[in-house]
Structures are given as C-alpha cells and as structure tokens.
Amino acid sequence: MSRVFSPSFRRVIRLQILFVLAAALFLWWPSTPSAKPATHVIDMDMTQFAFEPGRMTVNQGDTVVLKLTASDVVHGFYLDGYGLKTRVEPGIAQQVEFVADQPGKFRYRCSVSCGPMHPFMIGEMVVSPNQPFWKAAGVIVIALAGLISHVWFNDTKGVLDEQTQQEQ
Ligand SMILES: [Cu+2]
C-alpha cells in the first residue's frame, strides 16, 4: 500500500492539525489573574460634585471593597443594580463590600442632595463577563469547527475512494 495522499486529503489533515493546535493553545493559555476572582480595594473620595475614581472596572465574580470618604459635605453612595446605599459624612469613612456578580454597566450616584449639581454626581462601574465562560465558549467553537472538518474530511475521503475504485 503505497498510495500517495491526494492534495485535498493533505489539506484536510493540515486543517485538522491546525484545529487541534488551536484548541490546545486555548486550553494551555495561562489563566490571567482576571480569570480568578480578585478583590479590589478601592479608595473612593466624594466631593461636590464628583466621585474619584469616576469609573471602576472589575471582572464578574470579583469582590469590591469600597472605602468611601467625603471631603467637603455629606454625600451618599448608591449603586444601581446592586441596591447598595450608604451615607458618608466628612471625616467618617464608610466601607462597603460586595461581589460583582452581575455583568454589565452600572451607575453609582450620590444619594444625598449635596448642592446644585448633585444630580450630575455620577460614576460608572463596568463588570466584564466571566473570562472562563468565554474560554469555554472558545473551546466549544474550535471543537465544533474541528468536528465539521472531520465530517467533511470523511465525506471527501469516501468520494475519493469511490473515484479510485472507478479508475481501477
Ligand atoms: Cu453629593
């Protein structure tokens, strides 16, 4: 049996090797620290009429520890979607701790009327979707593509075998 593989056969084999390598790379790729739940300790200061920082970015599943301070007048911290509400008086730090379990964008706003621009005292928390989920989704997509190429390869092989038999 010294049948030389046809070019299309070799192309399919090469394609399948590529899929296996891609899947292996995906699985092997080290989990970034963001993939594991992290704890973010954030010092958040409130002044008329802003939060500092005005934007927080965390990953789903992370624990957020907010150390809230007010440097001028009494402010409040209210986080949409999480139902968190705390009143913060100058000189008295408040600590809020929660797990960012819902992905999406959530606004935090001042919940104590603190002056004329109070309604514009808004910040934003971005919770990125769980990394392991996307990793799993990626592996599934590659596996499906591999499966399709495998099925296609078998079909092609059948046709090639038939052709070979007809030629003989
Ligand atoms: Cu305020």
Image: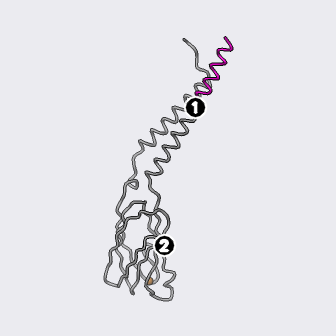
Left/right of residue 149 with respect to residue 23 in the rendered view: right
Residue on which the image places disc 2: 107
Q: Which contiguous range is marked in magenta?
A: 152-168
Give residue 34's quadrant in the image: bottom left
Q: Residue at x 68, y 14 (%)?
A: 166
Q: Residue at x 47, y 62 (%)?
A: 103
Mark 2 burial class by Cα count in 10 Å: few <14, some 14-19, many 20+: some
Q: Quadrant of ligand 1?
A: bottom left
Residue 151: assigned label: 1
Residue 140 percent location from the top left of the image: 50, 43
Q: Main secondary structure of the magenta part?
A: helix
Q: Is residue 94 magenta?
A: no
Residue 79 percent location from the top left of the image: 44, 74
CB at disc 1 and ligand 1 closer than 8 Å: no
In front: label 1 or label 2: 1
- Seen in the picture, residue 39 relative to 140 is either above or below; the reply is below
Viewer-proximal residue, 113 or 69?
113
Left/right of residue 30 with respect to residue 13 in the rendered view: left
- Seen in the picture, residue 92 relative to 139 is either above or below; the reply is below
Q: Residue furthest right?
A: 167
Left/right of residue 144 with respect to residue 27 in the rendered view: right
Residue 23 percent location from the top left of the image: 47, 39
Q: Earlier in the sequence, mark 1 or mark 2?
A: 2
- The amino acid on which the numbered mark 1 sits, given as a three-letter code, is Val
